[in-house]
Amino acid sequence: MARIVRSGLIQCKNPINDESRSVAEIQRAALDAHLPFVEEAAAKGVKILCLQEIFNGPYFCPGQSVRWYDAAESVPGPTTEVFSALAKKHQMVIVVPLYEREQAGVYYNTAAVIDADGAYLGKYRKTHIPQVNPGFFEKFYFKPGNMGYPVFQTAYAKVGVYICYDRHFPEGARALGLHGAEIVYNPSATVAGVSEYLWKIEQPAHAVANGYYVGAINRVGTEAPWNIGEFYGQSYFVNPRGQLLTVGSRDQSELVVADLDLDLIEEVRRTWQFYRDRRPEMYGPLTAQEE
């Protein structure tokens, strides 16, 4: 019997773009904007759902303000508790990208993975942190991830997470495959004119090179007061052959859904034996420390 898993991605506009409002109020509105899409996913039979990068608020990294440190929370914590209840209610695996506070002054760009019974399985912390002018001053907000590349055995599939800027680095994408990932989710926040031309190149390449599915998520709309450009949406699923299965709109908040045939992974890897033919003993210079 074929292993078909229906998966969903939520791309969503930030509902409040007003710096006079409190961080807590902005976060609550963002959460409320996502909840109908979670219910829609349940109604459509989605079994694994992923939200966008730091889903419960704007992408605040174009500025450098300590105000946004208030958006960070413990993981697990109050927001994962909300989604644990939803996961259990709908028997749905949910990947929840959050701004994590480990302790005073130590913050990470994180994604929590919650199983279909509501159990918190663990988290991935974004590894590669950009400092790109203009618009992406992430080193002000995030410490680089320190948990490696975990893969989570969920009720429906082995799931890995790579976050936004990580996608420019093939090493972690390969590590996720070596750790057994069948589906890798990449929640992102990226704008037109910066990396749009790469959006539909890099992640299909990861899918092909590693023989797994990728779910790529990008938010939509523009966000004041930063106005760094248009978040161009176009969230999509790509299969292990590098074929796009479904693509979201450029400018609409929506749920993007695809049926993923996990048996295709075995079929593709029997043709393209990249794991058999790789030569790790030859790759030492890639990780050698510079003197």
Image (cartoon, rainbow, N blue to C red):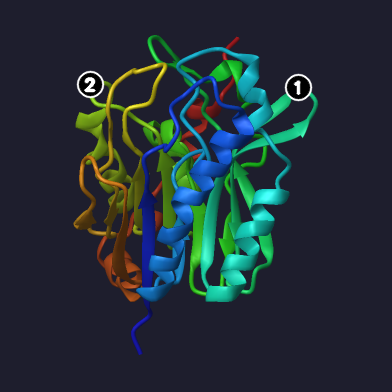
Q: Return the x and y of residue 277 as percentages of the image width and height.
A: 36, 53
Residue at (42%, 38%) from the top-left corner? Answer: 15
Q: Is residue 201 left or right of residue 216?
A: left
Is residue 210 at all visible to an observer of this figure?
A: no
Figure quadrant of residue 167: top left
Residue closer to the observer: 28 or 134 = 28
Q: Is residue 213 above or below residue 187?
A: below
Residue labelled with disc 1: 105
Label 1, secondary structure: give it. loop
Residue closer to the observer: 290 or 149 = 149
Q: Residue furthest bottom?
A: 1
Upstream in sequence: badge 2 or badge 1? 1
Q: Is residue 3 above or below residue 208?
A: below
Residue at (37%, 55%) from the top-left corner? Answer: 9
Figure quadrant of residue 84: bottom right
Residue at (22%, 21%) from the top-left corner? Answer: 193
Q: Is residue 39 above or below residue 289?
A: below
Tag on residue 128? Answer: none
Q: Return the x and y of residue 23 as percentages of the image width and height.
A: 60, 29
Q: CA distance from mark 2 to mark 1?
A: 33 Å
Residue labelled with disc 2: 193
Label 2, secondary structure: give it. loop
Q: Return the x and y of residue 223 as percentages of the image width and height.
A: 38, 26
Is residue 155 at all visible to an observer of this figure?
A: yes
Figure quadrant of residue 104: top right
Residue closer to the observer: 281 or 68 = 68
Residue at (51%, 54%) from the top-left corner? Answer: 160
